[in-house]
Amino acid sequence: MTELTQESTMIRSAADRLAVAAQTGVPCPPVRDLIGAVDIDAAYAVQQENNRARVEAGGRVVGRKIGLTSAAVQAQLGVDQPDLGVLFADMQYDVEAPVPVDGLLQPRVEAEIAFVLGKDLVDGELDLGQVIDAVHHAVPAIEICASRIAGWDISFADTVADNASAGGFVLGKEPVSLEAFVPSEVTMTMTVTGQDDSTGQGRDCLGDPLLALQWLARTARDLGDPLLAGQVVLSGALGPMRPAAAGAEVSVTISGLGSLDITFAGAPR
């Protein structure tokens, strides 16, 4: 068996392992035993394999998420860059209805700024000015991270392969233009029932959530799947994640953007 065939086989095996976990609701072992703990190309190949299958099954891509934007989390995983995942239409939950926790594996919540694009980010240098001009508006968001990997035992490659641990998201309903607030200067507080508050600032997200968006625009284009008008971008956590469980109430306030509240219902998978 050639080296290329061996690599393809390992990528396919890792993708299958994660797909079965998603389908059965039973978390799986990490996939780094198959693709290595830091092989970025292999990890994105696994992610793309499962996302392609999801599209072929009728899934509709509505945006992207950025992960590992916190310096502390990067240090914990021994990496020096963020990662990205794909958002599908069926991952969005209505802010006015309880979120069914039984549809999510090992859910955790993060508070973020979501940017909604009004222009494609396909051509040109994708400098910061071009990226800012492409943003139609922003809203407060709660990302629901989920891991198909048992116990969140993840390396960088594990989370990338697992679609950047994407599970779901909820968006606020009141759009705010970039002329009305400065993303790097916001402050955030997230309360979750029975847990310490999660707090942070805009600059905790790669120095500026708009820089995170620029990184995503360039990386997504390099991967052959650029950002397009109408898509939603979750720009990265402004503070630490918190576990979510049935009955949990989550409240997020981001200065300049407003507040967002959700409740989880059901029994965890």
Image (tube, rainbow, N blue to C red):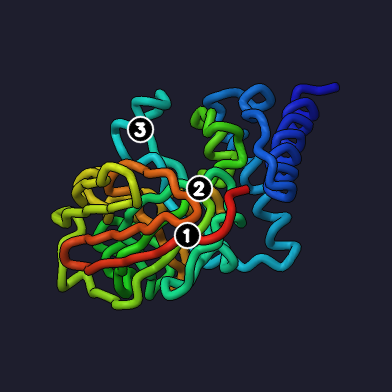
Q: Would you call the spot at circle 1 few (<14 residues within 10 Å), some (14-19), or many (20 or more)?
A: some
Image spot of residue 42 (x, y percent) = 62, 34
Q: Residue at x 17, y 66 (%)?
A: 256
Secondary-structure class at tag 1: strand
Above or below, 242 relative to 234: above
Relative to the observer, which residue lies in front, 62 or 5? Answer: 62
Residue 264 is marked as 1
Whole-percent x and y of residue 76? Answer: 37, 25
Q: Amino acid at mark 3?
A: Val
Q: Which mark is residue 73?
A: 3
* Quarter of the picture holding the N terminus: top right
For residue 37, say whether it is visible: yes
Q: Quadrant of residue 179?
A: bottom left
Mark with earlier residue (2, 3): 3
Which residue is located at x 59 percent, y 46 percent? 105
Residue 107's tag is 2
Among the 4 quarters of the image, the one containing residue 210: bottom left
Q: Which of pointers 2 and 1 lies earlier in the amino acid sequence?
A: 2
Give the residue at x 54% y 49%: 223
Report how far apart the C-alphas of labels 2 and 1 lie in the structure.
Answer: 10 Å
Asked if the residues shown at circle 2 and circle 1 are in contact, with their CB atoms under 8 angstroms apart, the answer is yes
| Circle 2 Cα neighbour tier, 10 Å, few/some/many (<14 / 14–19 / ≥20) | many
Instruction: Kindly report the distance in space between the C-alpha atoms of the residues bearing marks 1 and 3.
Output: 26 Å
